[in-house]
Image (spheres, rainbow, N blue to C red):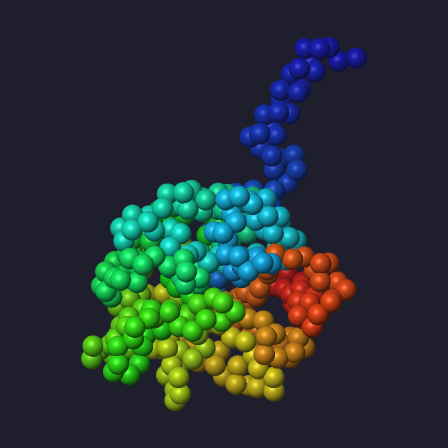
Amino acid sequence: MNSPCNISFLTAVFVVLLVVFPTFLFGEDPTSQESLQRIEVSSDGSSFVLSESGRRFTPWGFNYDHDREGRLIEDYWNDEWETVVEDFHEMKTLGANVVRIHLQFGRFMDSPDAPNQDSLDQLKRLLRLAESEAIYLDLTGLGCYHKADVPAWYDALDEEERWDSQAVFWASVAECCVSSPAVFCYDLMNEPVVPGGVQRRDDWLGPAFADKHFVQFISLETKGRERPEIARDWIDRLVAAIRSQDEEHLITVGLVPWSLDRSGMTSGFIPERIAEPLDFLAVHIYPETDKLEDALETLRGFDVGKPIVIEETFPLKCGPEQWATFHETAQNDADGWIGFYWGKRPDEYDPPETIGDGLMLRWFELFQENGPER
């Protein structure tokens, strides 16, 4: 029989091994902070890799842009934190390795040059949650999705002042996130646009979709400047703000598919004109029924020698099976895919009570069937 002294000694050794060398006992913990390696662009610029192992990384995840009631994350992440925790766990269970978070400017800035510390603290809490779930974050900023939440002082700023305030936003967010391994990228803005024509706009926001303003103008008038020149100057300003605090995490901007330099409507963010300061390009593509080749042609138009992430995609304008065909066909052109999750588990859609429920249920099936780890 072991003596109490020997038992105490063995217990002490076990505790040391458990705390200091957990992998000695159990192997690598996939949810540990150490298992999250920083994501970087491969040496040939063609894909993403893990910084330490060099293993290829394919972003595959969800836009967590609102909950089941249409609320933005800042509307509930203080009082209903457990909801966020449960949703992140569910997204991880479904196979996501990236979650795109949309940060609202009005919740993170109290004045043109004063960030809101409570929101930054909550963002740090979100980073810790992402680390615990081994999920990377696509942090998309400067959101003005709910027009009622946009500060009046923000809309009153002129272009130069507005860009300066946006730079403060990004410097503050980058300072908050610089040491976290859970950051996949900073996305400067969701679907920015430079106005066309000669008339001055009177509104910084584009038309609403489902009560949310996803498109935002970065200027109200061109003043004789080329539109891609304005877009590049704006990107340079914000990239510099981020790099003043964080020199390593990737930077992109979420582009509408009509950013290409071709006839018809265009955003002014022509890929080959604005890509140089960005680490990769992010484009939003929703393939349309019987127009698969059009979607593929659009995707290829964003190939400027850097990885491409389809940062928003969903069978919104086509059937699920057509979307699956698009995904399969675009494998050689896209280096990452981010769909949607709105706070409801697949079993909550089953049996479907509406056409929308049936679509979401099939979407989750497609997501799990087509993931890079399948």
Q: Does 321 sit above or below residue 370? A: below
Residue at left offset 71%, top offset 10%? 4
Where does the N terminus fall, quadrant-wise?
top right
The furthest residue to the bottom = 263
**Residue 45 visible, this angle:** no
Identify the image quadrant of the C terminus. Answer: bottom right
Q: In this view, does 281 lie above or below 35?
A: below
Query: Between 149 and 44, which is closer to the camera in this rendering?
Result: 149
Residue 206 in the image: x percent, y percent?
A: 40, 72
Displayed quadrant of residue 148 = bottom left
At x 50%, y 44%, the residue is: 78
Number of numbered callouts drawn:
0
Q: Which of 202 and 90 is in front in this view?
A: 202
Residue 268 lies, in percent from the top left, at 34, 77
Image quadrant where residue 95 sits: bottom right
Residue placed at 61% from the left, 63% from the top?
Answer: 372
Which residue is rendered at x = 20% and y = 80% of the image?
224
Let me know if residue 29 appears in the view.
Answer: yes
